Amino acid sequence: GIITNRRVIDINYNIIISREVAATTMQEIVDVTGSSSGFLPSIFNYGDVNIQTPGTNQNIEFLQISFQKRT
């Protein structure tokens, strides 16, 4: 996935010849949730992030990404 100060873009490649692209602007984001469960994700600080968009827009999900600690 790609996150800029204006948009969030998720590109998923299916098999070899197919890809799905989901994108939304920062203004369209309704909610962001993160989850991490299991031994390895807890030790290595990674998990899933789900970005919810309004209405029938496709939600964006980043799987098994690194969680950064806030400073």
Image: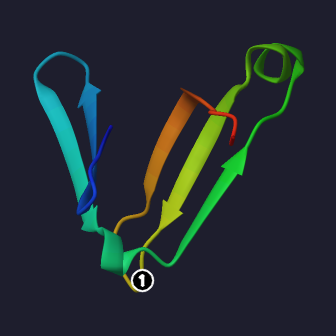
Please indicate whether residue 36 sits to the left or right of residue 31 in the image.
right
Number of labels in the image equals: 1
Picture coordinates of residue 41, whole percent (x, y) = 77, 21
The extreme left residue here reads 17
| Residue 54 appears left or right of 35 | left
Tell me if residue 51 comes above or below residue 45 in the rendering. below
Outermost residue toward the right in this view? 39
The quadrant of the image that shows the N terminus is top left
User: The C terminus appears in which quarter of the rendering?
Assistant: top right
Is residue 66 shown above or below 34?
Answer: above
Q: Is residue 2 visible?
A: yes
Residue 56: percent from left, percent from top? 36, 80
Which residue sits at x=69%, y=35%?
A: 69
| Residue drawn at (68%, 49%) of the image | 34
Q: Nearer the viewer, residue 71 or 34?
A: 71
Residue extending farthest bottom? 55
Whether residue 57 is visible here, answered yes or no, is no
Color theme of the render: rainbow
Q: Quadrant of residue 2?
A: top left
Badge 1 crowding class, 10 Å Cα cut-off, few under 14, some 14 to 19, many 20 or more, is few
In the displayed structure, 29 sits above or below 19; it is: below
| Location of residue 44 by image quarter | top right
Q: Amino acid at mark 1?
A: Pro
The residue under the point 50% across, 79% down is 30
Q: Secondary structure at mark 1?
A: loop
Determine the residue positioned at 36% across, 65% down: 58
Image spot of residue 66 (x, y percent) = 58, 26
Farthest front residue? 71
Residue annotated with mark 1: 54
Instruction: Provide residue 4's location: percent of width, then percent of height.
Output: 26, 50
- Please give left or right for residue 46 compared with residue 12 in the image: right
